Image (cartoon, rainbow, N blue to C red):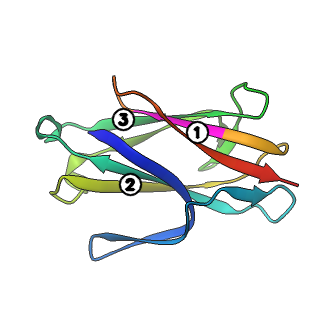
Amino acid sequence: MRIVGAFFAESVRTAEGKLDVWGGVLDTVELHSPVPVVHLVVLLQRGPDDLGSPTLIHVAVTGPSGEPTAVLYGKEEVSEFDFSVQPMSLPNRENNYISGPFLARFGSEGRYAFTLSVGEQEPLAIALHVEG
């Protein structure tokens, strides 16, 4: 399984096997507004070797200082988290997606980098800016 793209969105839902996105390619959130839920959307491409084996997508968060930074994912504050992708949970097609919400609780203004990686694939980094 390869990551072919990723972005943040305000809201996502699945309908008839397709992804409906609202507020996609979100770039900036407000530091002092009510804590928003931000959805991380990851676009995937399945290869012939991916059938039957789970894929782990690792996400690491780096804050404005360049150091690992915690965000609220589920009920935990973490600077790294994983999506486990079960092939049986995805439609039987080459192009797929996964999405996971997290609370965008950031301690300061600045640029937060989210680096996504799968196995030996070159990591993909996307940014979310936090403004006061």
Badge 3: how crowded within 10 Å, few (<14), some, or many (20+)?
Answer: some
114 falls in the magenta region: yes
Furthest residue toward bottom: 16
Picture quadrant where residue 51 is located: top left
Q: Quadrant of residue 17?
A: bottom left
Q: Disc 1 vs disc 2: which is toward the camera?
A: 1
56 is higher (above) or lower (below) than 19: above
Residue drawn at (13%, 34%) of the image? 49
Which residue bears the numbered disc 2? 98
Dot placed on the residue nearer the N-terminal end, 3 or 2: 3
In front here: 19 or 100? Answer: 19
Packing grade of label 1 (10 A; few <14, some 14-19, many >=20) is many
User: Which residue matches tag 1?
Assistant: 114
| First along the sequence among labels 1 and 3 | 3
Q: For the residues carrying marks 1 and 3, which lies nearer the camera in this image?
A: 1
Label count reads 3
What amino acid type should be assigned to the residue bearing mark 2?
Ile
Query: Is residue 21 on the magenta stretch?
Result: no
Give how far apart the Cα atoms at labels 1 and 2 are.
16 Å
User: For the point 40% across and 27% down, which residue is it?
Assistant: 122
Q: Is residue 63 above or below residue 131?
A: above
Taking the spot 66% from the left edge, 48% from the top edge, the residue there is 128
Q: Is residue 53 left or right of residue 68?
A: left
Q: Main secondary structure of the magenta part?
A: strand
Q: Which residues are magenta?
A: 113-117
